[in-house]
Image (cartoon, rainbow, N blue to C red):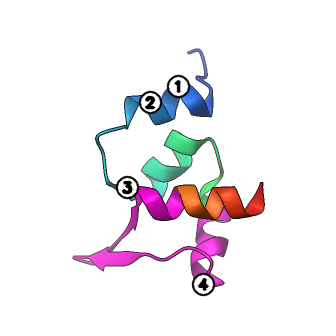
Amino acid sequence: MKKESPMVMTMVHEDKQWFSQKEAAKAYGISESSIKHARLSGDLPFSKLFGKVIIRKKDIEKCIERVT
């Protein structure tokens, strides 16, 4: 299976406003552990819905901008 670049993956998810941690990692080409670390350090705001972590698209993008 061909791995798509983060830019292509992001374009696929343009309409999606909330991601699970796993979806965010796949869509933005970063590891789930990096997302978890950012959440736990307070750098990435998140919510929980029925015990599942969900992260807003705009918060993911802001966090990525700060570290790049």
Percent of width and height locating residue 33: 65, 63
* Crowd band around label 3 with a 10 angstrom C-alpha radius: few (<14), some (14–19), many (20+): some
Kindly state the secondary structure of the residue where label 4 is placed: loop
Label 2, label 4: how far apart the Cα atoms are: 27 Å
Q: Is residue 1 above or below residue 23?
A: above
Outermost residue toward the top? 2
Amino acid found under the numbered disc labelled 2: Met
Q: Nearer the viewer, residue 12 or 22?
A: 12
Kindly state the secondary structure of the residue where label 3 is placed: strand
Label 4, label 1: how far apart the Cα atoms are: 28 Å
Amino acid found under the numbered disc labelled 4: Gly
Q: Is residue 59 left or right of residue 51?
A: right
Name the residue at 61% across, 22% down: 3
Q: Which residue is mark 2?
A: 11
Label 1, label 3: how far apart the Cα atoms are: 16 Å
Percent of width and height locating residue 42: 60, 84
Label 1, label 2: how far apart the Cα atoms are: 5 Å
Amino acid found under the numbered disc labelled 1: Val
Name the residue at 60% across, 34% down: 6
Q: Is residue 43 magenta?
A: yes
Q: Which sits earlier in the primary sequence, circle 4 or circle 3?
A: 3
Q: Which sits earlier in the primary sequence, circle 4 or circle 1?
A: 1
Q: Which residue is mark 3?
A: 19
Q: Which sits earlier in the primary sequence, circle 3 or circle 2?
A: 2
Closer mark to the observer between disc 1 and disc 3: 1
Q: Nearer the viewer, residue 30 or 65?
A: 65
Label 4, label 3: how far apart the Cα atoms are: 17 Å
Q: Which mark is residue 8?
A: 1
* Crowd band around label 2 with a 10 angstrom C-alpha radius: few (<14), some (14–19), many (20+): few
Q: Which residues are magenta?
A: 34-60
